[in-house]
Image (cartoon, rainbow, N blue to C red):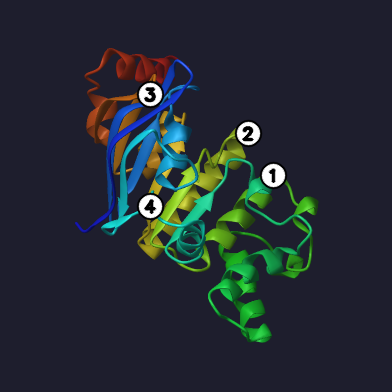
Amino acid sequence: MNLLLEARGLHLKFGAIAALDDVAIDVSAGEVVAIVGESGSGKTTLLRVLAGQMAPDSGTVRYLGGDVLGMTEAERRRLMRTDWGFVHQNPRDGLRMGVSAGGNVGERLMALGARHYGNIRDEAKAWLQRVEIDAARIDDLPRHFSGGMQQRLQIARTLVTRPKLVFMDEPTGGLDVSVQARLLDLIRALVHELGLSVLIVTHDIAAARLLADRILVMRRGQVVEQGLTDRVLDDPQHPYTQLLVSSVLAA
């Protein structure tokens, strides 16, 4: 597999608390990697560092060989418009709430140079349908959508430009269980269809099993276990991983 993202020796402290303690991670082309752990384990901090949104105290992050941490803000923004996408836990953080559903999707295309209004609108309609939103609602504002619809709209906005690598931060967090299941099925289908590489943060072991090829388990800023998803979840070696898996089985 071609290596897309590679990080080594990541350290980051917030006061006396080690948010990241010598963390290393790789993501290859076409691979889905899940980072799991309890609240405060460092998983979201790791995602933000890898996406260039936060600087570590030390360590390296490289994308296709290039130094992510050494990029200018303009270079990072360009990367996020082209090769990368980011799906936030709260869709309001990833959408422009004062812009129509179609406008939210179309803006990403315009950022890559699309200018034909009719083509942009047609592509936006197609993507709304792809994420199970009625194309007739293309001119509706996101605030008139349910939480699950807002999340699906954010996914359409993110994936319309077919990024190579997508960062997802608890994409099903805060949604009803039935809505979560539909959203996970949709994400899995789109990942397979588009051949995406995905780095997903989740506390949901079931979501990790459904989506991920590999899994990293974090606790107190450290990666305590990693490997193929089925291996880690069916035969966990670290006591913390065993506790996570047993708590799901007992639920």
Quadrant location, the N terminus: bottom left
Residue placed furthest toward the left: 1
Residue 236 visible in the shown view: yes
Q: Position of residue 102 (x, y in %)?
A: 69, 68
Disc 2 marks a residue whose amino acid type is Gly
Q: In the drawing, does residue 3 fall left or right of residue 107?
A: left
Mark identifier at residue 221: 3
Helix, strand or loop status at disc 2: loop
> Gap in Å between the C-alphas at discs 2 and 3?
24 Å
Sequence-earlier tag: 4 or 1: 4
Nearer to us: label 2 or label 3: 3
Tell me the CA gap for discs 1 and 3. 30 Å
State the CA–CA distance, disc 1 to disc 2: 9 Å
Horizontal side, residue 138 vs residue 52: left or right: right
Residue 147 is labelled as 1
Amino acid type at mark 4? Gly
Q: Crowding at label 4, few (<14), some or many (≥20) Cα neighbours within 10 Å?
A: some
Q: Which residue: 38% across, 35% down?
A: 35
Determine crowd level at label 1: few under 14, some 14-19, many 20+ residues with C-alpha closer than 10 A.
Answer: some
Tell me the tag on residue 174.
2
Percent coordinates x, y for residue 121 in the rendering: 66, 78
141 or 47: nearer the eye?
Answer: 47
Is there CB contact under 8 Å for labels 1 and 2? yes
In whole angstroms, how far apart are the C-alphas of marks 3 and 4?
A: 23 Å
Q: What residue type is labelled 3?
A: Gly
Lower position in the chain sequence, tag 1 or tag 2: 1
Question: Residue at image x 54%, y 47%?
Answer: 183
